[in-house]
Structure formats: C-alpha cells, structure tokens
Image (cartoon, grey):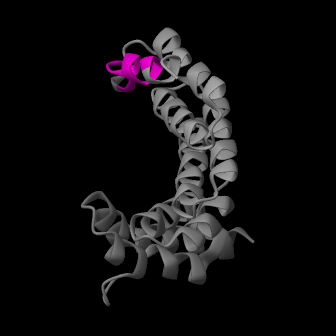
Amino acid sequence: MQFYIKPLQAEAANQTYAAEQYFRSGIYDLALNGDGNALGFAQVVDEYGKKAGAAVYLYAGICELQLGNADNAISYLKKYNGKDEILAARALACIGDCYVNLEDYNTALGYFEKAVAAGDNAFAAEYLLDAGLVAEKLGQNDKALGYYKQIKEDYPMAPQAYDIDKYISRIEAK
C-alpha cells in the first residue's frame, strides 16, 4: 500500500506547485484549470482525489468562488476536511460567501456562524462582520447588533473593529 499511495501523494504535491504559484498571484483561472503545461487544482482533484491532500479542495473552491462559480465552489469547499482550524473556518466562511452570491442568506448566515465557532482566530472578526451584514439583510437586527458588539468587545484590535461603531449606531437608530 505504501508503495502505491506514498508515490501518488508525492506526485500530486509536485503537480500542485504551479497551481499554487498562480493562486498566490491571483490568477485563479490558471490555478484552477492549469496552463497546458502544469495541472490546475481541478485536474489534480480529478486525477489524484484525496491522495492530493485536503488543501487542493480548499484551493479549488476558493478559485471557483473568485471566478464567480458559487455552486462549483461549494462542491469543492464541502469536501475540504483539513485539520487546521484557521483553514477550516476559512472554508466555512467561503461557503457562506458562495451562498451570499446565490442570495441564499439564511444558509449563508449559518455558515458564517459556523466559521466563527470553528475557532477563535484573527479572522473571527471578519466572519462576525459578514454574519452581521447578512443578519441585517434578513431583517434580524438584534442578531446583527450582537455580532457587531462582539467584534467591538472581543476583537478591538481587528481591522473590522475600527469602524464598527457606525454599524452599531445604524442599528440602534432604527
């Protein structure tokens, strides 16, 4: 088994190098679909599946999201099962972004809440702000206010906290 799986894992890792470079450069189409010489994340997933590692699903999902393909992005992101709590939270938040793009705000809110719950990290304030904006869109102003106040109290140094008072004031003025 190790003589079959280990070489495939190494080969898959080598195949993702170019795709990762395109991803880091923000060239999402080439990162996803390859450039004709190197495979993209979609081909790596098709060819190697889980042997390529969990990260390829996250990369492919983010590429699809950036390219405006929310349904495809959701499909990839739901297959991501990495152990890193920051990346797991990011995958959940990206799924939330997909549902916002699909105008399914109730589902989006659930994913942003899951992203916040997945781990208390530097991005939690971002996910709380997203949750608050979606809650407002749904007319759930009390819930949105709670998210905004949580940013102010728990993440005062986060970039989202710098102008959080305007969000709080907007809701309190209603």
Looking at the picture, tell me which residue is in the foreground, 43 or 136. 136
Q: Say if the magenta span includes residue 17.
A: no
Q: Which residues are magenta?
A: 160-169
Q: Residue at x 46, y 33 (%)?
A: 126
Q: Nearer the viewer, residue 10 or 40?
A: 40
* Image quadrant assignment for residue 49: bottom right
Measured as percent of width and height from the top left, residue 21 is found at: 29, 64
Which is the main secondary structure of the residues drawn in magenta?
Answer: helix
Mark count: 0
Residue 11 in the image, given as x and y percentages of width and height = 49, 74
- Whether 18 is drawn above or below 114: the answer is below
Q: Residue at x 61, y 64 (%)?
A: 74
Farthest top residue? 153
Which residue, as the protein is rendered here, is positioned at the far bottom? 36
Q: Residue at x 66, y 36 (%)?
A: 113
Quarter placement of the N terminus: bottom right
Residue 74: tell me if it is visible: yes
Kindly tell me whether residue 39 is visible in this rendering.
no
Residue 37 lies, with reference to residue 111, above or below; the image says below
Q: x, y (%) of residue 62?
A: 46, 61
Q: Horizontal placement of 84 versus 31: left or right?
A: right
Residue 92 place in picture, x, y as percent: 61, 48
Instruction: State the residue in front, 40 or 147.
Output: 147
- Asked if 62 appears above or below 89 in the picture, the reply is below
Residue 163 vs residue 3: left or right? left
164 falls in the magenta region: yes
Q: Is residue 110 left or right of residue 157?
A: right
Q: Residue at x 56, y 42 (%)?
A: 134
- In the image as oriented, which residue stretches furthest toward the right? 1
Q: Is residue 71 above or below residue 104?
A: below
Taking the view exactly as shown, the residue that stands out farthest to the front is: 174
